[in-house]
Amino acid sequence: MGDLVQHRKVELAEISGKTVAIDAYNMLYQFLSIIRGADGTPLKDRSGRITSHLSGLFYRTANLVEAGIKPVYVFDGTPPTLKEEEIRRRISVKKVAAVKYERALRLGKIEEAKVYAQATSRLEDYMVSGAKSLLTLMGVPWVQAPSEGEAQAAYMAMRGDVWAAASQDYDALLFGAPRLVRNLSITGRRKLPRKNVYVEVKQEIVELNRVLEELAVTREQLVTIGILIGTDFNPDGVEGIGPKTALTLAKKHGTLENILPNLKKAEFPVEPKRIAQIFLDPEVTPHYVLKWKSPDVEGTLDYLCKGHDFSRERILGALERMSTGFKEGEKKATLEKWFSSA
């Protein structure tokens, strides 16, 4: 899907004063993958508990709030049954990566080991509950989705309760999010895996209406394109069909029902209409409260410093910058709202 849509690179300042619903699982997985030692070992406290996700969540959230952005995190609920195959595939990939990681370590191939280590990242229940506790202490709201977090984030954006959904995946567009923000959790220079090459990573905004206009398709056809290429609910897509071919088929035949008879040897593990239904009528909840508060400084310090051995000085400094950013963001949002209604 990424090959078909136009990305507009922006600075964080352009998102200042905006409220963004972040796919929490997506972001936490990134932190678990990226925040590791040279040999791939994740960040841990003195008790041996992994804290990479807490470190990434705290500092990145503080940076976003300091920039005047109001984040709300959306956590996945029970995945649709159609996602079971993809979940099994991911578990299998992690097991294979774990074996390769240990082998690379034994052979002293440290850089290779780190690449495999990143692929072994697993988000455990205690990590999720810890992330929610930390966000509450920081005064940042979070929402528990009944099913897919991206679907819930998209729904909140469609209602106008948030300005955009944020994720690395493009599913939020298929779920109907009017705007998608990518690279919100990562920025700056990043080294490409297994290459001595660095790239500059910036935030990107993808607008659904612009995508539909440029491709000359409807949202339903965009979902059809996603199904043909492959989604979490049919990971393999249709053999031999890439983004450009999928776009051509969608524009030529219009609907998924008209496309299917023209696909030779096309096999779907489930009825494609069921997949489309997940995107077009997802399970979401309208019952959520978005309220930002000043961070509980002492509570956050106790949780991170006493509980997980973080640096008190660094945490306190980030909280102070966060408080200042929150106040400035509130002023900017109020001004924009006043001028837009004037």
Image (cartoon, rainbow, N blue to C red):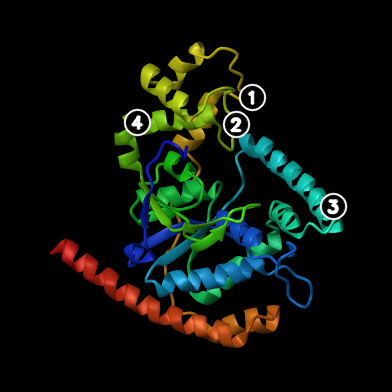
For the residues labelled 3 and 1, the Cα–Cα distance comes to 35 Å
* Labels 2 and 4: the sequence-earlier one: 4
Residue at 49 percent across and 81 percent down: it is 319
* Labels 4 and 1: the sequence-earlier one: 4
As helix, strand or loop, the secondary structure at mark 2 comes to loop
Regarding residue 266, the answer to whether it shows in the image is yes
Q: Would you name the residue on which mark 2 appears?
A: 234
Q: Are marks 4 and 1 in contact (CB under 8 Å)?
A: no
Q: Position of residue 238 (x, y in %)?
A: 57, 24
| Residue type, numbered disc 3 | Arg
Q: Would you name the residue on which mark 1 appears?
A: 269
Q: Are marks 1 and 2 in contact (CB under 8 Å)?
A: yes
As helix, strand or loop, the secondary structure at mark 1 comes to loop
| Circle 1 residues within 10 Å: few <14, some 14–19, many ≥20 | few
Q: Would you name the residue on which mark 4 appears?
A: 218
| Circle 4 residues within 10 Å: few <14, some 14–19, many ≥20 | some
For the residues labelled 4 and 1, the Cα–Cα distance comes to 25 Å
> Residue 103, which numbered label?
3
Q: Is residue 144 above or below residue 58?
A: above
Which of the two marks, 2 or 3, is nearer to us in this view?
3
| Circle 2 residues within 10 Å: few <14, some 14–19, many ≥20 | many
Give left or right: position of 310 versus 274. Answer: right
Q: Where is residue 256 in the image (x, y as percent from the top left)?
A: 45, 21
Q: Where is residue 24 in the image (x, y as percent from the top left)?
A: 55, 58
Q: Quadrant of the C terminus?
A: bottom left
Residue at 42 percent across and 75 percent down: it is 66
| Residue type, numbered disc 1 | Pro
Q: In this view, does 122 lie above or below 137?
A: above
* Labels 1 and 2: the sequence-earlier one: 2
